[in-house]
Amino acid sequence: MRRAATRDRSTARAPIALGVLLLTLFLSLALPGTARAATAACVADAATGCINGTIRTAAGDPAVGVVLAVDGPGGASQATTDATGRWTAPVTEAGEYTVTLDAATLPAGEQLRDPASNPRTVTVALGASAGALFPLGEPTAGGGSGGEASASPEEDASDGEVADDAEVGAPVGASESGSFSWGRLAQQATSGLVFGLLLALASVGLSLIYGTTGLSNFAHGEQVTLGAIIAYIGAQTFGLPLVVAGLLAVMVGAASGWVQDAGLWHPLRKRRVGTTQQMIVTIGLSMALQYTYQFFFGGGALRIVTTTPTMITAGPVRISTTSLWSLLIALLVLGAVAYFLLRTRVGRATRAVSDNPALAAASGITVDRIVRLVWVIGAALAALGGVLMGLYLNATSWNMGGALLLLMFAAVTLGGLGQAFGALAGSIVIGLVVEMSNLVIPSDMRYAGALLILILVLLLRPQGILGRAERIG
Amino acid sequence: MDWSRILVNVAGEIFAPTTAAYALAAIGLNVHFGLTGLLNMGQAGFMLLGAYGFAISTIAGWPLWAAVLVALACAAVFGLLLGIPTLKLRGDYLAIVTIAAAEIVRLIGRSTALTDLTGASSGLRGNSYKDTFQDASPFPDGTFALGPFEYSLNASNSWWIRLVGWGLVALACLLVWLLMRSPWGRVLKGIREDEDAVRSLGKNVYSYKMQSLVLGGVIGAAAGIIYVLPRAVQPDSMGRPMTFFIWTILLLGGAATVFGPVLGSIIFWVSLMLIKSVMREGVPTSIMRTEQIEQFGWIIVGVTLMLLVIFRPQGILGDKKELAIDVR
């Protein structure tokens, strides 16, 4: 049926090609010359060796933005920990390297458990990785009392010549050895709620776009990254106040949504390119955009705000003021989206298109205009989610959105594909699962737990929590 | 610019082990997508499982044949597990689930909890599992030069791995060719074109889809072994981008064809190598640093995938009538 509709092929061809090119060049034109040196991920091969490690705070959270200097026979270089607390430095010559941690860049209130072992010496061979451990916590040697930082003291007694990267102070042992406490549960639940609401900002857009166009947008994660990166440029390169930078990011995000729909998806729909085909296009777009970000901003962590956030303690729960503000903004914006969808004319039209585009068109709704609007709103929400997520995670990077994408899909599927409120509920569930699974499984597997839920939902209730039971086979 | 060196490098890509591994993985994906119409977005997961299965059992001291069997069995079980919840669902659900499942494999593999088994994110070093494969080589030790191409006979990036890799590619092509002509293959194509019609003929669509998923996955696992033999098992190098490259390769060469994946893989790696080496020589580092050239290459891949899907979804060798992207 669709194959017959190739009449306007020649007319549609040029704008689409142009759209593709425009989109990929979008950033390169918008952000000239902001390329900066950063640590790219290091892969050990015949000519390179890697020194790496992961730095975690005493509470087991990744320590972001810690600067380490590496010096040795292959020359000196610098590494910065990324959003997961991981740092890596490639070396091109084997030998002994000194790794110095810049204690001034540690998050506030954190200190080295063993200051004597900074700087430390690591022996690296080409084609291999060597770990350099810098455990954080109370500086006493026997102090396993520092809460979850119960990484064995033998670990920092070893002279750092570990062939693999040790997740320093990771709650691996801690979570297994019955360190469960109600305080920790409350802490994780709070983090989960914040994370879930921020995730919801991004996934509501994904869900709206799926609802109105039937497109599973694999490039939605890049919209999230875009927001975070624009905020980074605004705040760090141009020195704007954070709020202004955030607003700028949302506006650029909205504009990119408009450009994307006008330049790419609208022409594709007009050409009657099927949604599955469009889905593969989004995959290509996602890949192109991710590497474009990496091209200009490198593979390292980008900190939107470099000051350390002030923490508020309420009972067992510690939360930063930034996270509280983010929570508030997310709630307000999601409330506004709900109001828009339920109470306004355009919102009702959006839901009508979501339900049945043909019927909506027949009843006088301009489907294309609604879809355009949905793209703008979805991209703007994603950008806002990206800014807040970048603040919540302390830093952003070229693949932040990519890493979150599958969680968004999990949330959207959990709530029922195309259901905006389902996406909200699903996001909160996923957020709670991601953060609270820390209590049971190693923290670096927490995303896997959320994805497992995605698969289980599809097995047991494919229409999602709020979706209507219908045949989707 | 040293053109002869660049040309030798580029021509070397034509029969490089990586090219063979990707061709093999794309053949597996072709069984899924080209023949059956399954949108498997997790082919890298099958490869990673194959690589882990092979490497871990070899390190545990198992002989070559047993390790290969373990790798293939891992992929088969993974395919079964994946197929049970998803094969009854619509295409894009399958895509999301397979991509998520592949990520789960990678996340678990790189978790520090399994450092003893999988080496966490730094992976398993090549030398720890290469021996059984290299010992199986009939060649003497040393290097051998064929024209300008000089590689060692057995070690790592060797003639031996090239021989085995391309031998497997040839076998897989033959298998796909035979399957496409067999009654079984016709049922798969029928499912691709119209699932309900096949069901009304009394065929068990679910079971056929499952067989296709497992078969393609097993071919993917073999590709995973070939891919990691000249290097190391690095979970992060076998993530989503790898799946997307395989898709680009398949769509470039032409889905639902016998030689499409092979041609796609060769063109993909040769042109990528050509672009990168010319840029490395020709573009001053003040304009683009070395790692930026690398990223520029991947940007081109992404744009190529988009343009391919929009303008020529059947690829170079394919037939548009045979393309199953939007049947359902």
Image (cartoon, rainbow, N blue to C red):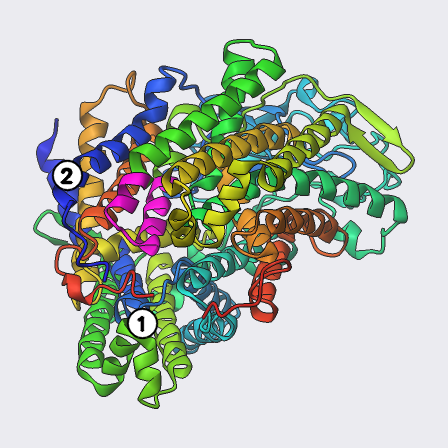
Judge the density around disc 1: few (<14), some (14-19), many (≥20) Cα neighbours within 10 Å.
Answer: few
Q: Residue furthest bottom?
A: B202
Amino acid type indicated by mark 1: Ala
Percent x, y for residue B146? 10, 54
Compare residues A316 and B12 and report the one nearer the observer.
A316
Above or below, comparing residue A400 to residue B175 in the picture: above
- Residue depicted at x 23% and y 65%: B140
Q: Position of residue B130 (x, y in %)?
A: 39, 62
Q: Is residue A193 found inside the magenta-colored segment of the image?
A: no
How far separated are the C-alphas under marks 1 and 2?
59 Å
Residue at label 1? B136
| Chain label for disc 2 | A
Position of the N terminus of chain A by quadrant: bottom left
> In this picture, which residue range is highlighted in magenta?
A266-287
In terms of depth relative to the viewer, which is nearer, B319 or B57?
B319
Q: Position of residue A122 (x, y in %)?
A: 58, 34
Q: Amino acid at mark 2?
A: Thr
Task: Please tell me if label 1 and label 2 are on a single chain.
Answer: no
Q: Is residue A416 visible?
A: yes
Mark 1 falls on what kind of element?
loop
For discs 1 and 2, the disc positioned in front in the rendered view = 2
Quadrant that contains the C terminus of chain A: bottom left
Q: Which of the 4 image quadrants contains residue B194?
A: bottom left
The secondary structure that most of the magenta stretch takes on is: helix
Out of A318 and B23, give the one closest to the viewer: A318
Q: Which numbered circle lies on residue A11?
A: 2
Q: Residue furthest right?
A: A315
